[in-house]
Amino acid sequence: AQNEATLYVDGKKSNITISRHIYGQFAEHLGRSIYDGFWVDKNLNVQKQGRIRMDIVEALKKIKIPNLRWPGGCFADEYHWRDGIGPAKDRPKMVNTNWGGVVEDNSFGTHEFLELCKLLNCEPYISANVGSGTPDEMSKWVEYLNFDGLSPMTELRKRNGNAKPYHVSFWGVGNESWGCGGNMTAEYYSNEYRRYATFAKDYGNAKLKKIAAGASDFDYNWTETMMKNVGHRMWGLSLHYYTIPTGNWGKKGSATGFSEQEYFNTMERALRMDELLTKHIAVMDKYDPKRNVALVVDEWGIWTDVEAGTNPGFLYQQNSLRDALIAASTLNIFHKHAERVKMANLAQTVNVLQALILTEKEKMLLTPTYHVFDLYKVHQDAELLDIKFVSPDYSLNGKKIPALNFSASKDINGVVNISIVNLDATKEISLTTDLGDLKWNDVSGELLTSANLSDINTFEKPDLVKLQKFSKATKNGSQLLVKIPPHAIVNLSLK
Ligand code: AHR
């Protein structure tokens, strides 16, 4: 029937872990992400450690962010790390050519980033400069951070206050090398990767996980060339995919004002992540059938027009329930491909693109997307469970997409979490489940929804869209029956 769905969850071991690194974040020197985001004026009246804003740190710790990618993005291929170490007063002031032409004063550099990661209790993921850098510069950055012996780099690190190495494992070798990272061809970049990677060494027990700059969207040739020419010399190969509501980079669409048709089109585009992953993975499988090389979706999210009156180069956009539905659906897709997708980074954590957190002077708010990461944190490092489902369509003006998407996992304590997204703008859907051999006694649930798809949290009303208790899941014998509200995200925990 039209508003009915079925879900089968296989309780047997899949031996596939949903890596916590799928929940990774991204903070570029862009707009108000670092400066006036994580790193604030010393006179701003908020709790700080140095100049790091602690309300942001606490909020991100709560959702257990596993890693943070830095310093870019496009910024990374113009960044020279030595500009950002040593006494702040001696650091050069320069122009951020990629993002608004503003002054980059280098007050936030390597040590400040690693201090932030320590406070967040997350792993650093550093993107090194390939576009305008040198293999020596990257090699010395690795040595500066990871070596424990005697060398000019370790002496310099000690002079800058850190006697002990940082052991940074995740290293990006360039970013978007087909575009802002140097406009290279895949063939050319694959050679550059090999050269840079050769001189980025493992020190002590910090075995580097090198991540090659990967394809944009549907560029399967890039993936093919990298797998053929580089293969196991990389730990991971990246992929970037942004959801543009209108599909037009010139006029992307508003973050807050959109029709149901535009919402539908946006979701259709967001769901293409599944097709993209399936096809890039098929290419990778040809060269690496054992799935040793990770696919790393280190930039993803919705990209809309900026808010009126803000600097177009700062990419500041509001965040609505629509964006939360994109985030939840995308995470479900990542889970489905978790055998290959071992890392992903939402673009970007604070004040930029699909942010988790927005700030305005002393004020801070958590976006609907933040609440998805909170709801879904139960899946981090849990075992993926195999699912099959039949979903009704969400149809609009002759086009259709599946109304529902799901994922299920089992955590180390044996708790099964089933996440359900209903994209249909207006219809509640009744779900009947077959949970195979799973043994459970009790179900509890949480829900994220709001009256309108375009509802947002504002500094005046920061809690309009927030998690609520969900009570429309019932146990009927061994069956679980659920009524899923329209445009909603539900997580059910079975114990
Ligand atoms: O996230 C914003 C920008 O999008 C990044 O700097 C770049 O890598 C991508 O094009």
Image: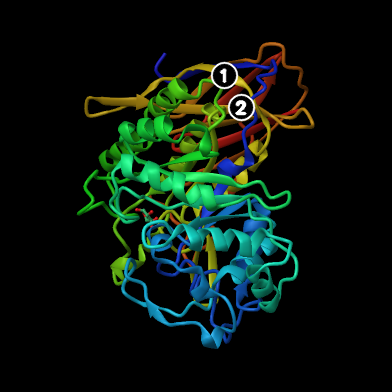
Q: Is residue 157 left or right of residue 373?
A: right
Is disc 2's CB within 8 Å of ligand 1? no
Is residue 100 at least partly visible in the picture? yes
Asked whether residue 426 appears in the rendered view, the answer is: no
As drawn, 35 above or below 8: below
Q: Which residue is mark 1?
A: 387
Say which of 472 and 207 sits in front: 207
The percent position of residue 442, horizontal first and vertical second, equals 75, 27
Local crowd size for mark 1, using a 10 Å CA cut-off: few (<14), some (14–19), many (≥20): some
Hey, which residue is sitting farthest front in the picture?
151
- Quarter-wise, where is residue 157 in the image? bottom right
Label located before the other in sequence (1 or 2): 1
The residue closer to the viewer here, 421 or 81, is: 81
Cα distance in 3D space between marks 1 and 2: 7 Å
Q: Are marks 1 and 2 in contact (CB under 8 Å)?
A: yes
Residue sitting at 33 percent across and 38 percent down? 217
Q: Nearer the viewer, residue 409 or 289?
A: 289
Residue 430, given in percent of the width and then of the height, sits at 51, 22
Q: Is residue 419 above or below residue 305?
A: above
x, y percentage for residue 403?
A: 41, 27
Q: Which residue is mark 2?
A: 408
CA neighbours of label 2 inside 10 A, class few (<14), some (14 to 19), many (20+): many
The residue that appears at 54% across and 82% down in the rendered structure is 41
Q: Residue at x 47, y 35 (%)?
A: 329
Nearest the viewer among 234 and 242 is 234
Residue at image location 59% in from the left, 66% down from the top: 113
Q: Quadrant of residue 126?
A: bottom right
Residue 289 drawn above or below residue 472: above
Q: Amino acid at mark 1?
A: Ile
Q: Secondary structure at mark 2?
A: strand
Which mark identifies residue 130?
Answer: none
Check disc 2 and give the amino acid type.
Ala
